[in-house]
Image (cartoon, grey):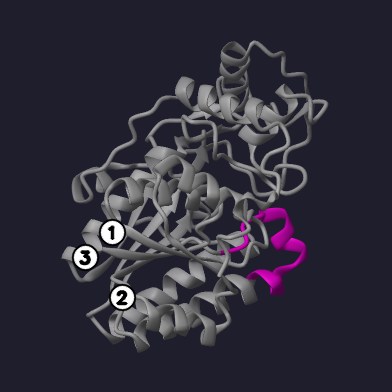
Amino acid sequence: MKILVTGGAGYIGTHTCVELLNAGHEIVVVDNFSNSKLVALERVREITGKLFEVCETDLKDGKTLGRVFSENQIDAVIHFAGLKAVGESVSLPLRYYQNNVAGTLTLCEVMDKFNVRNLVFSSSATVYGQNNQTPFRENLSLNGTNPYGRSKLMIEDILQDLHSSNPEWSIALLRYFNPVGAHRSGKIGEDPNGIPNNLMPYISQVAVGKLNELQVYGDDYETKDGTGIRDYIHVVDLAVGHLKAIEKVILDNGIEAYNLGTGSGYSVMELTQVFENVSGQKIPYKVVKRRAGDVAESYADVSKAKRELNWQAKKGIVEMCIDTWHWQSKNPNGYKCTEEAGAFKN
């Protein structure tokens, strides 16, 4: 199959591209590189030994997107592209709705024009809002509590309406929990812009000396050590989940949501301790006040993905930390834009 990957130069996108190529699929990557690096795709080529087309464009550019479809026989789309910083979305809501929602509308219009109706959408566990009914199941009521989460929920609703209007659409809504880790080669990993919003890259940047100390947001939750518990999933397991979702949407028409997580959680202090053990680095930390909207526990019920996608996470927390440290220690400043990927761009 030939699969269009939007946002394919991002953290989850690059790892999914590796798995798709290694599974024998052809890919075309579309990315505007607003929060990703072109060199990451060159690293994908190095890992897989496979060539693929890369088009630098914004999803809202329907004309360029249409050219990509007209020049390639696309069978399915995996849609990662989107802004994802919760805090930033609160201060810049219009940017998030314009980028995430409007970009998806244009993508779906172009897909429909070219009769490509197989779609895997990168959603998020944030659509569950502040629901305390852990583990989160796909049939819970949904409620985005910030513009980022609401943009994901809006898109889920739009895709539901799209399928209702035309049952030929086959869509998987993948609700991620907390992706961490990196490819075992250490060539690709998470490289956030500025101060990391997520725990694992924050810890790893403290460990490598890029940041001075970890900020722990609250130690007075009703958990075993007072810090928040989250469901962390290795990014390679997550990438494999997309392959399973592609197989599902190709075979069956319909629209279904799936949690992708491990089904268990670790606290902030547990994750920090494991990272210290595998890296040999001390992680200094300071407890600060809770963040608004944070819940004590968040972890997935993954039984539906296991049953319907024949997928479950295989990698544990130790491997997640080992692979993160391997990536961060080899790339203390993340990706560096060099000319090694200069010939990649169309």
- Residue at which label 1 appears: 246
Mark 1–mark 3 Cα distance, whole angstroms, equals 6 Å
Does 331 sit left or right of 240 as displayed? right
User: Magenta segment, which residues?
Assistant: 82-96
Which residue is depicted at the point 59% across and 73% down?
Answer: 57
The residue wearing badge 3 is: 250
- Residue type, numbered disc 3: Ile
Is disc 3 in contact with disc 2, using a CB cutoff of under 8 Å?
no
Q: Position of residue 42 (x, y in %)?
A: 54, 49
Residue 27 sits above or below residue 243 on the image:
below
Q: Nearer the viewer, mark 2 or mark 1?
A: 2
The x and y percentages for residue 187 are 54, 36
Q: Is residue 148 above or below residue 265?
A: below
Q: Residue furthest right?
A: 212
Res. 32 mark? none
Relative to 232, residue 171 above or below: below
Residue at position x 46%, y 48% from top? 45
Left or right: residue 272 compared with residue 91: left
The residue identified by callout 2 is 73
Amino acid at circle 1: Ile
Res 207 visible: yes
Residue 56 falls within the magenta-colored stretch: no
Image point (61%, 15%), residue name:
279
Viewer-closest of 248 and 69: 69
Q: Circle 3 — which element?
A: helix
